[in-house]
Image (tube, grey):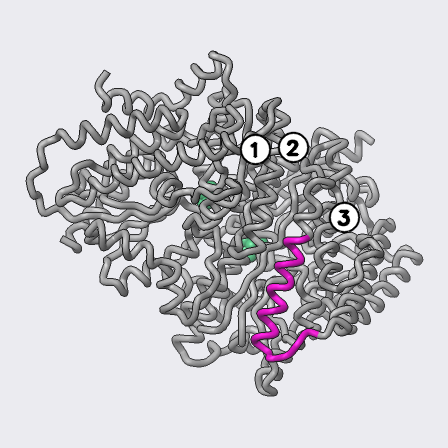
Amino acid sequence: MSIMKQIEALYTQRGVRARELRQAGEKVIGYFCCFVPEEIITALGLIPFRIQGSQREPIDEADTLLEPMACPFARSCFNMALKGQYEFLDGFVAPHSCDTIERMYHIWRSNTPSPFNHLINVPHMMGPSSAEFYKNELHYFAGCLETFAGRKLDLEKLRQAVRLYNRRRALLRELYALRKAVPPRVSGTEITKVLVAGMGIPAAEHIDVVRAFIDEVQQRPAPRPDGLPRIFLWGNEIDDIAFIELVESCGAHVVMDDLCTGTRFFWEDVPETDDPFDGLVQKYLCTHCPRSLVPQAGGRADDLENRFGYIREFAAQWKADGAIFYIVRYCDTCELEGPDLKEYLTQQKLPVLMIEDDYSTTTMGQLRTRIQAFLEMIA
Amino acid sequence: MEATQQVKTTAVKGTETAREVRALVKNIYKSAHEAKANGRKVAYMMVASHYDEILRAMDIVPLPTENYAGLCAAKRDMDRFLHKAEADGYSQVLCSYARIGLGFDSLRKELGRIPDNSPDGGMPLPDMMIGSSAVCDPRFKWYQATSRYLEVPTFAIDVVAPPPQADLNQVRDHYIAYQRAQFQGLIDFLEMQTGKQMDPERLWEAIRLGDRAWQLWYDIDRLRVAVPSPMPSQDHFSIMVAGHYYSGTQTAVDFYQKLYDEVKHKAENKIGVTAEEKYRILYGGGLPPWHTLWIFNYFESFGAVFAIENVYRGFDPVQVPSHVQDPVDYLAWRAFLRATRYHDQARTRSGSPAVEKLLGLIADYAIDGVVFHACRSCRATTIGQTHIKSELGKHCDLPMMQLVSDMVDLRDYSEAQWKAQIGAFMDALAARARRA
Ligand code: SF4
Ligand code: SF4
């Protein structure tokens, strides 16, 4: 099978590999968002599986148990669980990312409990005491997971897991570097498939996939200059290609992102510290996500720079011509962050289109005109 | 605006003392304006963050921005602020309290003064803003966004609570240690802003007053088990002002003492809210519809009285161990014990502290039916209602209903639909009464 076919299969049939592994006697631990260190799960010999929703399936069953004004990504995940599509999970781990995930943890746990269920409290504040608290939460999580797995966490194995995931992070950064070319060597749609494909398989297997994919891309003939605008994408959960495909089909290249399903989860390495928990805390707690509050730094301008400077660098290095925000509706922290980031990027002379959407492919058609108008404006 | 301001929003109160709350509310904004004029520090703040006593001990005048949003709704003067925030790019589904706050601050900045005829004179410019992660996400994020309109030192603290399944013996220490560090961080921030050291004795004094007021408030609620109900939920939505906005002051203690005496008198003399109390309702959760509080009187017209409620309710009193000698430690312990009050009970039955609390209220207050209010823009108090409703149904057989609107945004409210729903609910209550 060609590498693209393999990625396509992993992307479309997301639980297949996890089910296979389970049949072979492995235990699969489902988790949400960017705040659950997969390294701990892997070091205990378990398979981490990042829970995703489906923008293509209507949310039908969840509405009788979960209010429709909850984030539709979360509702979609729960909807799939109710329909038995996550029956292969031996464990269910939710970080306290936001109000919705925290509330949903209890609802999920009581309606479709897994043999192992756990909520990790993640501080919203950043600072030494938050790091200490999160470290304690990770120790408590690891302890509970040890009991479930029936084995002790070996710190050497945890160090190995840190190195393994850092290898994957480095490879993904290498892949992203191919997007710097003008035009980019690889499309945003392909990138999304590669990333989402990796969420449902062990990291070691994903590393092979990404390596093979990079090799394949490097053999492609260099694309001819097309003058199409280059887009930076900001938002929360985009685990389906529909939106990015739409932007690209309107005549643009999606070249860089700051998304829960993009750079946000892999960009920074876990520092290799003596106590591996320290490294995990350093990386995961500083994940750039609107749900974490960056302490105020000076006046408004300094504060915006402190919060969003990394995005300015992303946009500059990937030569973005404009930014599109894709906010899954009802995500309060993103809804509050969006206007600030828009102000900052506009000051940097980067035009912004802010879209709020329902995490559903059925609404894509309505977005086309707005995207086209935006692309014409920045062309 | 003129036309909508004519519309009645308030409810007829059951107690005399509740009628005095209006003055307390006015005084929040009046004293903030006076404080500004006298050079005292004023802070935007979030209620129920367990830090009230620290503010009082440091002489900070609190300006509760959520309350201001509720006030605007009760005055039916929210649209100009909501629309302004939306015009500035805030989503129509973002917490409407936050939208009103942002809209108000945006308009004030644009005009260079407080918008004309703002309810109760409007909020003066704060010297600082203090958010918190207690209860919901917008409460720690909103002030960061506000810095777009006013540049003042902004700070926030985490308020953490373990999930009910956590082994409290294993997590207690790190939760309390973190909570303590967060409070200490706030104290350090305030010391820097005011140039004054915090006096532990003053903090103890504020804690003593805070605990006393909340104990009285709890005692008042316990009196409300009386039949007929001596004080309905619409009064609760007023009288909570003392506990949440005056916590740590003598004013709150005096107010609740007076209310206690009145409610006790009513309970002992069987003076009820309505002439004939047919049904006793539990307000199961969700923020109240500030725009339409008269709806409680509408229920009463059918003989249905809201005997007790599960929102803005004072935390049950907790016993901090006597070895805790430092006031900041005390605050951290108290926050932890409040948050885990129903955890042990939950583990032995429903798994949910919220369900346990409601089951307790249903039994103690001889409840006949439960009403929830889903607020479209408040995730924190709405998500889980449907689930709680269905879990409750496993342990008791009562008519329950969920009304849907928003705490302030009228665009999500339909009077006709509510009245139809309430009619059906009354039928269910009547059918249940016949069966009994
Ligand atoms: S998109 Fe926002 S609301 Fe939804 S799960 Fe992520 S952080 Fe929570
Ligand atoms: S989301 Fe709800 S709890 Fe949070 S500030 Fe808004 S109204 Fe209050």
Q: Residue furthest right?
A: B268
Number of the front mark, 3 or 2: 2
N-terminal label among 3 and 2:
3
Q: Amino acid at mark 2?
A: Ser
Q: CA distance from mark 3 to mark 1?
A: 31 Å
Q: Chain of mark 3?
A: B
**Horizontal side of residue A357 vs B166, given as left or right:** left
Q: CA distance from mark 3 to mark 2?
A: 26 Å
Magenta segment boundaries in residue numbering:
B177-198
Q: Nearer the viewer, residue A280 or B225?
A: A280
How packed is label 1: few (under 14 Cα within 10 Å), some, or many (20 or more)? many
Please provide percent x and percent y for residue B167. 70, 37
Q: Which residue is mark 3?
A: B303
Q: Which residue is mark 2?
A: B390
Q: Amino acid at mark 3?
A: Gly
**Horizontal side of residue A114 vs B323, given as left or right:** left
Question: Which residue sits at x=74%, y=69%?
Answer: B248
Please provide percent x and percent y for residue B367. 78, 42
- Which quarter of the rendered picture does the C terminus of chain B lie within? top right
The answer to whether the residues at label 3 and label 1 have Cβ atoms under 8 Å apart is: no
Q: Which residue is mark 1?
A: A65
Q: Secondary structure at mark 3?
A: loop
Question: Which residue sits at x=33%, y=28%?
Answer: A207
Question: Which residue sits at x=58%, y=72%?
Answer: B43
Please provide percent x and percent y for residue A39. 47, 34
Check the image and report above or below for A240 versus A373. Answer: above
